[in-house]
Image (spheres, rainbow, N blue to C red):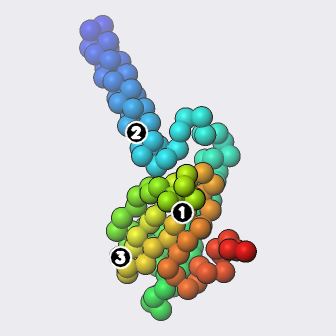
Amino acid sequence: MKGFILLILAIIAVVIVVGGVGAFHVLNEMGVGLDEINSDTIGDVVDKVSNVGSSGSSDSGSSDDSVVDKVNNIVKEEVKSNEQNGEGSYREVTYSDGGFRQYDTKTGDLIGSSYQSDQGKLPSME
């Protein structure tokens, strides 16, 4: 019985370690380093995900789509180098309707979009 309990504890420990390594890898792929993670960052991510879910697309389709439906419309999401600025990076999300949105990887702010409804939310170029 003692060996069985030790086996279960070992399996739980392995699952926790593998989960931590997986989470670390996902955060690195998203462009978030360990030194940048704090409670404000987690809150910002939740806010930005809510904003993505609540902002409409350029379609004149149903505005009653749930957040899950809108997330399922994501075709590709990648972190790209900011060539214009010479440094930094941005996250580009491409949707099934061909539109895209670009977010600053450090702040999570919307910095570019192909959707007309987002144009008022973009930072001023002046």
Q: Residues within 10 Å of mark 3 (few under 14, many from 20)?
A: few
Disc 2 on helix, strand or loop?
A: helix
Q: Residues within 10 Å of mark 1 (few under 14, many from 20)?
A: few
| Residue 107 picture location, percent across and down | 63, 54
Q: Nearer the viewer, residue 69 or 49?
A: 49
Query: Where is mark 1, residue-wise?
Result: 84
Where is the N terminus found, in terms of image quarters?
top left
Identified by mark 3, the residue type is Ser
Q: Nearer the viewer, residue 55 or 85?
A: 85
Does the rendering let one see residue 30? yes
Residue visible at 49% across and 79% down in the picture:
114
| Residue 12 picture location, percent across and down | 36, 24
> Which dot marks residue 96?
3
Residue 99 lies left or right of residue 109; in this view the side is: left
Q: Residues within 10 Å of mark 2 (few under 14, many from 20)?
A: few
Q: Residue furthest bottom?
A: 60
Where is the C terminus found, in terms of image quarters?
bottom right
| Residue 101 picture location, percent across and down | 50, 71
- Image vertical order of residue 95 relative to residue 106, above or below: below
- N-term mark: 2 or 3: 2
The quarter of the picture where residue 44 lies is bottom right
Residue visible at 43% across and 78% down in the picture:
99
- Image vertical order of residue 13 relative to residue 95, above or below: above
- Image vertical order of residue 16 relative to residue 89, above or below: above
Identified by mark 2, the residue type is His
Marks 2/1: CA–CA distance: 27 Å
> Which dot marks residue 25?
2
Does the rendering let one see residue 64? no
